[in-house]
Amino acid sequence: VEGFITTDTSLSEKLALPTVAVAGHQRVEGITNIILDHTRAARLALEHLRDLGHEEIAFIRGQTMSSDSTVRWNAICEVAQQLGIRIRPELTIQLEGFDSTPGIGYSFTKRLLARKQPFTALFAYNDIAAIGAIWAFHEAGLHVPQDISVVGFDDIPGAAFASPGLTTVRQPLVKMGQIAAQTVVDLIEGRGEYAPEIAIETEFVIRRSTGPANANNRRPTGIRQKTMSQ
């Protein structure tokens, strides 16, 4: 073994061999951290919703066990403040547990709807949670995007085939892996200069789960009766 590549792992001290951390989120001298530009990601998503006229936006935060959760949320809060978007505690819910299926987004969105607070858009921590949220909205008689716009994060393979197709922040995992591999090889062979961080830009994929907000949308969610037109 001549070097290490770690993924979503918190490292507290330098290792004996050249090391590249993908999504480590903690600066450690001697370790190159490949990170996602979460500020750009938050800006792309929130500007999209703002430009569609959404003012009351709900948020699903990630589990605390994920190294991405805190840094992603902090970026969202920072960008929201810059754009004049209010983040209301009653419209924010945090995922808990280890479920990695859409069921987790479904159950926590039902809790959000039970609060009966009006909102016209939802920005979910990841695509899995967003897809589950769409199920919960449908069950409550709410149409996506006519009543609620939904934005995910990651652009997993199933995002394009959700119903409707999911608007999402694309996380370039392949590119991050390629850069990590090349960086650790360069460190092993003594090429180039050590960099503490390498930030990777995100892309924003617009599909059919987002649409304009309008006056008819701004009603208390979770109490509308399901219509026969579905």
Image (tube, helix red, strand yellow):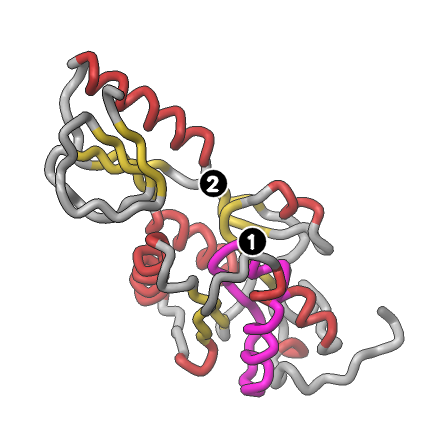
Residue sitting at the far left: 29
Asked whether, in this view, residue 78 is left or right of residue 85, the answer is: left
Which is more N-terminal, label 2 or label 1?
Answer: 1
For the record, the magenta segment spans 106-133
Residue at 42% x, 29% y is 175
Asked whether, in this view, residue 147 is left or right of residue 181, the answer is: right
| Closer-to-camera residue (43/25) | 25
Asked whether, in this view, residue 163 is left or right of residue 15, the answer is: right
- Closest to the camera, between mark 1 and mark 2, is 1
Tell me: residue 47, above or below residue 53: above
Q: Position of residue 123 (x, y in %)?
A: 50, 63
Q: At label 1, which amino acid type do we have?
A: Asp
Q: Is residue 35 magenta?
A: no
Q: Which residue is mark 2?
A: 203
Q: Position of residue 219 (x, y in %)?
A: 62, 83
Q: Which residue is mark 1?
A: 127
Q: Quadrant of residue 122?
A: bottom right
Q: Are marks 1 and 2 in contact (CB under 8 Å)?
A: no
Q: Position of residue 130 (x, y in %)?
A: 58, 60
Residue 212 visible in image: no
Residue at 61% x, 77% y is 110
Q: Give the class, few, some or many, for how many residues have Cα within 10 Å of label 2's Cα (few <14, many ≥20).
A: some
Q: Position of residue 80 (x, y in %)?
A: 36, 64
Residue at 54% x, 86% y is 115
Q: Quadrant of residue 22?
A: top left
Q: Is residue 129 magenta?
A: yes
Q: At label 2, which amino acid type do we have?
A: Glu
Q: Secondary structure at mark 1?
A: helix
Q: Give the class, few, some or many, for how many residues have Cα within 10 Å of label 1's Cα (few <14, many ≥20).
A: many
- Viewport quadrant of the N terminus: top left
| Mark-to-mark CA distance, 1 and 2 | 14 Å
